[in-house]
Image (cartoon, rainbow, N blue to C red):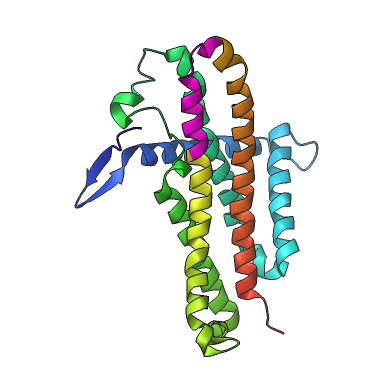
Amino acid sequence: MHETILWQVGNGTVHAKTLVMTWIAMLFLLIFIFLGIRNLTSGKPGKLQNVLEWIVDFVRKLISDNMDYKKGAPLLSYLVTLIMFVFFSNMLGLIPNVLAPLFRGVEFAQLNNILGEVVQMSPTADINTTMALATLTIILVIGLGIKHKGASYFHHFIEPHPVFLPIHLIDILAKPMTLAFRLFGNIYAGEVLIAVILLLPGIYVFGGVLPMPIWLGFSIFIGAIQSFVFTVLTIAYIAQAVAQDH
């Protein structure tokens, strides 16, 4: 499909395409937020400020619906950042694939030479990115569980009987795995299918007019849903960890 370009950093290596596209996703997110708060007002807000306020209220409601809001309030800024970063990352891979027919036979801004083929451009189409995000989630789950329950947090690992300890350990390990692979699989598959559509004969007639717009619309929907699912599952896992046992 494409060659993974690795950059040597000291004794380690990094995936060049994933790193660069992550920076670009972060840049787009910062620009979006800057434009939204540029003319911040408590009077008649602009359209982008309305969008940002809706996102914050949406995430705040997710927290209050799943857990005691006093416990979840410190997580609001992180969760708002998480849902927007995942969404922007999911959408980023659609841009070069959409423009690919216009640049057929031309190196797409020299990215082919630098980073490999213009396929799987979303940072979240790399399992390393999604696993890193999922690892942050499980660190929050364990950390907040200990913060709110102390040493008694670990007691649930041997409930209702110590024989269930292996099952609970598998459960805590499976959570980040399922989070990471769900997001990675959906975004990776979507970008591969877009690339396949671009290779269809008569791309400018049959492949371009019908399949591409339909699939792009579906990909945007899937990207939005996956950012929501990743965030709401993060909230749900944290809620389970901090909830008081009765």
Query: Which residue lies at the image location 30% right of the left edge and 46% below the top edge?
Result: 14
- In the picture shown, does residue 142 fall above or below 29? below
Report if residue 93 is visible in the image.
no
Q: Nearer the viewer, residue 113 or 196?
A: 196
- In the picture shown, does residue 18 fall above or below 217? below
Residue 214, percent from left and from top: 64, 25
For this orientation, the residue located farthest to the bottom is 161
Q: Is residue 202 magenta?
A: yes
126 displayed left or right of 159: left
Q: Nearer the viewer, residue 126 or 89?
A: 126
95 displayed left or right of 75: left
Residue 81, percent from left and from top: 57, 49
The N terminus, quarter of image:
top left
Query: Which residue lies at the image location 63% right of the left edge and 33% below the top edge?
Result: 218
Query: Which residue lies at the image location 63% right of the left edge and 72% below the top edge?
Result: 240
Q: Nearer the viewer, residue 58 or 39?
A: 58
Query: Which residue lies at the image location 48% right of the left edge and 21% below the top edge?
Result: 198
The residue stretch that appears in magenta: 189-204
Residue 35, percent from left and from top: 61, 34
Q: Is residue 17 magenta?
A: no
For this orientation, the residue located farthest to the front is 201
Q: Nearer the viewer, residue 98 or 63?
A: 98
33 displayed left or right of 166: right
The C terminus, quarter of image:
bottom right
- In the picture shown, does residue 202 fall above or below 225? above
Residue 83, percent from left and from top: 60, 48
What secondary structure predominates along the stretch shown in magenta?
A: helix
